[in-house]
Image: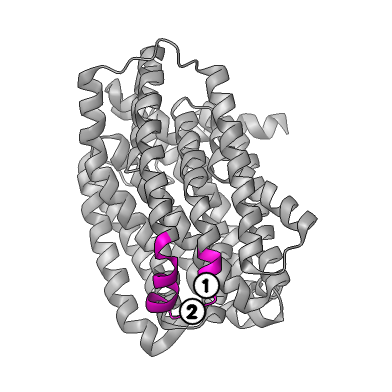
């Protein structure tokens, strides 16, 4: 085993990336496995209709919670990583206090708006009166969900990969599975109540850990740094908005134009397909701050080295996962219950889109961490237009199959455009995984 790791280290060229990715990979397996198990528990306990209400309310909250972070996610990674290189702990703490207060205020306001609008959304937008009670409970999810993922990005900037991934996804999924198993709720609203409680526990633990390791005393963010952060988040917010639209538009549009059962079918297939890209999240947790550090110090050769090393790792992991999903799609969907077996075709379509997302490498992070946010924004705008217009046309005609095809095509288009722009702006192709990288 030691010999194998040594060989991989030489091949990958960046041992810290490999060993860091192994740690992140383990946490991501935990996160992906727990999230997958959570979806199974929800689907089996609630049935297709109630599961559809839960997944629809969850999608709305995840989308809103992401937007309340105002584009700070990757700006935090970039600026905290930069401050860490300079050993500027006062600026790290100052940035945390400044951004935390802004996210808290906006997330509270958004939660109140969702609670007030629950009846209108359920009856007028989605035409699903039974969704209202679940949305009322889900409104309380927005604040802890926004803050827990905020904490994850802060830890990622410090290159603390394990806590970063725990607070971004893993811990909430693990606690929710345990909570649902203990309390065995029988409706979407009671299941959502358990989910909200678990999210509150996660953000509390994250805050305690951050304060323990990064004391807020002496926190100070310079005016010019605050201005730089605010300048950076403008394109990043649009990127975030379009990224979330790409991920959730299909599910939300199905919610408006189709049944709760089809929402559940698409949601379970999409979340299963996203297991293909879990290696992308694991490697990006290591690679993103490395890109930021190398860019800040003008080490452009290191950026290419880390990017191609990342692509090798991700492609090697993604190929067998894709094959497994295509071959065993009916069995995978049957895990959610007999009502979900018809989603095998949907799973295969979505898995292909996620596969393209993985093999193109860390192109989104590459552009963001090298001050090319506007280029990424333009690429995502094209993808979002394809997704929205395509969904408007395809979902009324072809239902859930149309949603799956459009979603996969939009994801693939976005990532291939980013590959082109990385080649144009940074001078290398992330798909060239067999290229020899000079030391």
For residue 417, side relative to residue 208 (left or right): left
**Residue pictured at 31% horizontal, 54% vertical:** 241
**Residue pictured at 59% horizontal, 46% vertical:** 199
- Pinpoint residue 194: horizontal percent, then vertical percent: 66, 54
* Measured Cα–Cα span from mark 2 to mark 1: 6 Å
Quarter occupied by the C terminus: top left
Name the residue carrying label 1. 131
The quadrant where residue 253 appears = bottom left
**Residue pictured at 43% horizontal, 45% vertical:** 434
Tell me where the magenta segment starts and ends, as one range: 116-135
Was residue 119 drawn as part of the magenta stretch in this picture?
A: yes
For residue 320, side relative to residue 236 (left or right): right
Please report contact status of discs 2 and 1: CB closer than 8 Å, yes or no.
Answer: yes
Secondary element under disc 2, as helix, strand or loop, is loop
**Residue pictured at 28% horizontal, 57% vertical:** 380
Whether residue 162 is visible: no
The quadrant where residue 389 appears = bottom left
**Residue sitting at the far right:** 182
Q: Nearer the viewer, residue 173 or 61?
A: 61
Q: Residues within 10 Å of mark 1 (few under 14, many from 20)?
A: many
For residue 377, side relative to residue 152 (left or right): left
Name the residue carrying label 2. 128
Was residue 367 drawn as part of the magenta stretch in this picture?
A: no
Q: Nearer the viewer, residue 273 or 138?
A: 138
Whether residue 148 is visible: yes
Quarter occupied by the N terminus: top right
User: Mainly helix, strand or loop, the magenta region?
Assistant: helix
- Pinpoint residue 291: horizontal percent, then vertical percent: 36, 32
């Amino acid at each position: 085993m030691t010999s194998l790791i040594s060989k991989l280290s030489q091949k990958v060229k960046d041992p810290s990336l490999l060993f860091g990715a192994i740690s992140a990979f383990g946490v991501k397996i935990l996160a992906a496995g727990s999230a997958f198990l959570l979806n199974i528990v929800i689907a089996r306990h609630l049935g297709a209709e109630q599961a559809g209400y839960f997944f629809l309310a969850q999608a709305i909250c995840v989308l809103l919670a992401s937007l309340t972070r105002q584009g700070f996610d990757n700006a935090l990674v970039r600026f905290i990583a930069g401050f860490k290189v300079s050993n500027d702990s006062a600026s790290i703490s100052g940035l945390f206090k400044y951004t935390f207060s802004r996210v808290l205020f906006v997330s509270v306001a958004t939660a109140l708006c969702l609670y007030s609008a629950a009846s209108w959304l359920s009856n007028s937008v989605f035409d699903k009166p039974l969704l209202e009670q679940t949305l009322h409970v889900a409104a309380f999810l927005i604040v802890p969900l926004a803050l827990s993922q905020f904490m994850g990005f802060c830890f990622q900037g410090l290159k603390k990969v394990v806590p970063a991934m725990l607070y971004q996804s893993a811990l909430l999924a693990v606690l929710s599975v345990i909570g649902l198993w203990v309390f065995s709720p029988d409706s979407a609203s009671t299941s959502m109540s358990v989910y909200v409680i678990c999210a509150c526990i996660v953000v509390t633990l994250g805050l305690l850990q951050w304060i323990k390791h990064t004391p807020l005393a002496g926190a100070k963010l310079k005016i010019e740094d605050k201005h730089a952060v605010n300048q950076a988040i403008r394109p990043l917010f649009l990127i975030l908005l379009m990224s979330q639209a790409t991920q959730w538009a299909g599910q939300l549009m199905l919610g408006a134009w189709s049944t709760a059962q089809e929402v559940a079918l698409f949601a379970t297939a999409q979340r299963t397909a996203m297991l293909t890209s879990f290696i992308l999240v694991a490697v990006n947790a290591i690679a993103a701050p490395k890109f930021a550090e190398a860019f800040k110090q003008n080490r452009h050769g290191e950026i290419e080295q880390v990017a191609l090393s990342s692509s090798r790792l991700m492609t090697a992991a993604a190929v067998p996962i894709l094959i497994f999903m295509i071959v065993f799609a009916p069995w995978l969907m049957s895990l959610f219950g007999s009502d979900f077996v018809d989603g095998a075709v949907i799973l295969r379509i979505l898995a292909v889109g996620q596969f393209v997302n993985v093999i193109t490498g860390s192109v989104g992070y590459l552009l963001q961490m090298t001050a090319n946010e506007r280029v990424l924004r333009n690429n995502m705008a094209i993808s979002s237009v394809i997704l929205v217009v395509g969904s408007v046309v395809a979902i009324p005609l072809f239902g859930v199959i149309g949603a799956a095809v459009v979603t996969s095509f939009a994801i693939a288009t976005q990532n291939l455009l980013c590959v082109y722009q990385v080649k144009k702006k940074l001078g290398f192709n992330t798909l060239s995984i067999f290229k020899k990288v000079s030391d």
